[in-house]
Amino acid sequence: MAPQHKLVSFTLNGKPTQKMIDVRASLSDMLRNDYSMHSVKEGCEVGECGACTVLIDGETFNSCIYLAVWVEGKDVVTTEGLTGEDGTLSDIQQSFVDEFAVQCGYCTPGFIISAEALLRENKRYTRDELRKMMAGNLCRCTGYENIINAVEKTMEERLEAKAKG
Amino acid sequence: MYDMKALYEAESVDHALALMQEHPDALVMAGGSDVLIKMREGKLAGREFVSIYMLDEMRGITLTKDGTIRIGSLTSFSHVIRSEIVQQHIPVLAEAISMIGGPQVRNIGTIGGNTCNGVTSADSGATLMALDAEVELRGPEGTRVIPLQKFYIKPGVVDIKRGELQMALLIKKEGYEGYTGHFIKYAMRDAMDIATLGCSVNVRLSEDKQTIEDCRVAFGVAGPVPMRLPSAEEVVRGASISDDLMHAFAEATEADVNPRTSWRAKKEFRLHLIKTMAERALRACITKAGGTI
Ligand code: FES
Ligand code: FES
């Protein structure tokens, strides 16, 4: 059967966009190949490692096991969307740098997206809860400690900023 | 790229049913977290699919007039966990489901997909069974409702006829009102792991909290599909609460189950776990319900 294509309209990092997409493409394929969102990593490609995590309507999804055509009408965010126009890092991205939460860096964008999702709730979580909420992301380098430090630090900063109004 | 022959995206439930008639060999895809992974492994390669993922009409949890809790089949695990109706009436379901995979898996995985796969380790299966859940199916001939227990036929096989879609899971008032539930999952890790065993118990105590009026216990992975344990239930039904009763309950589970040896655990170990978990879950239910042992 000839390849089937479909026009997909959605919002990527705050900008509306549309493109003809092969219906067989995963969301990670589309984001990397058609939109050059190379922060979206393909690790296991079976939904185990979380390297490909993106936000869809504010919730985390493994884009490797999500069909690209399913983002029709939805709001997709990758780490490219967290960085400012001039390349300034967002608070959580900067915390990963400051806390040495990055070694090889392959898992980092996925972790940052998972962190961003929980940080947006503006709630205080214990380290154990943070670990559980980040359990869908694997890292083979850091041993996780510094990653949790980075998330905890940003969580406290945001809560403080909110308290100040 | 996934190796599929064609993808038909349904735009409504009626459209999905029509697509399934038109393409009788096509498989139905919900969240895809099972099917798409199988495709990566080369299984199911080159097949046609009818995707129902975009059908928002199949999502959401409602309380009907007669008190039935209706969970649309495409409702994600995360949404089941966060549902106020679930939190208020059947918190045990949220407890069980929050142990599935990790956050991303719970966001894509659907309660309908989890039951339609017919796998015994499905964390939702045992708990839904212990709530006497029913399955609503819609096909070309209309809608039918069957008990979840009858829905599971054998590993990977459920009672869905050709052309039928699973629309919802139903939990009647009689299934939850007055009951207190508890779920225990035994696995090697706390997250991203498949259960070695899962045990769900629901009890209803008498007003003075001395007697177990009713008890339902169900296990995942204690047999080829999730199952209820009728002999163990019979032992405690109508009996007054005591330590001996707890042991008798644990011992009685053996008659109902049929665990297998796999790389996760040997049969003997699973049998030991079944007794221990059943007893612990029953004790927890009684305590939660305000009784003492
Ligand atoms: S690449 Fe998607 S979860 Fe591993
Ligand atoms: S930094 Fe290397 S995998 Fe996490």
Image: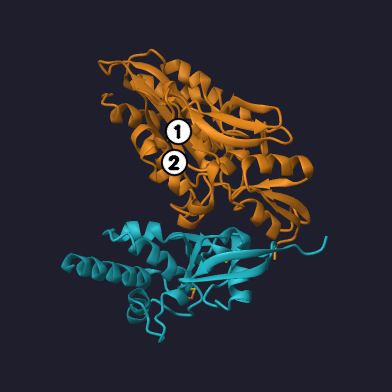
Chain colours: A cyan, B orange
Q: Are marks 2 and 1 in contact (CB under 8 Å)?
A: yes
* Chain containing the residue with disc 1: B
For the residue pair B3 and B119, the one nearer the viewer reads as: B3
**SS at circle 2:** helix
Q: Residue at x 39, y 36 (%)?
A: B92
* Type of the residue with mark 2: Ala
Residue at (76, 56) in percent of width and height: B6
Q: Position of residue A24 (x, y in %)?
A: 70, 62
Give the image quarter of residue B5.
bottom right
Q: Nearer the viewer, residue B217 or B257?
A: B217
- Establish if A8 lies above or below B137: below
Direction from residue A101 to residue B218 in the image, left or right:
right
The answer to whether A137 is drawn above or below residue A103 in the figure is above
CA gap, disc 2 and disc 1: 8 Å
Residue denoted by label 2: B96
Query: Residue B33 appears at what percent x and percent y?
Result: 59, 53
Q: Quadrant of the C terminus of chain B?
A: top left
Residue B266 x, y percent position in the rendering: 58, 41
The local secondary structure at tag 1 comes to strand
* Quadrant occupied by the N terminus of chain B: bottom right
Q: Is residue B99 visible?
A: no
Residue B57 circle label:
none
Instruction: For label 1, count other residues whose C-alpha is less than 10 Å away and answer few (under 14), some (14-19) or many (20+).
Output: many
Label 2: how many Cα within 10 Å (few below 14, some 14–19, many 20+): many
Q: Residue furthest left?
A: A164
Q: Which mark is residue B200?
A: 1
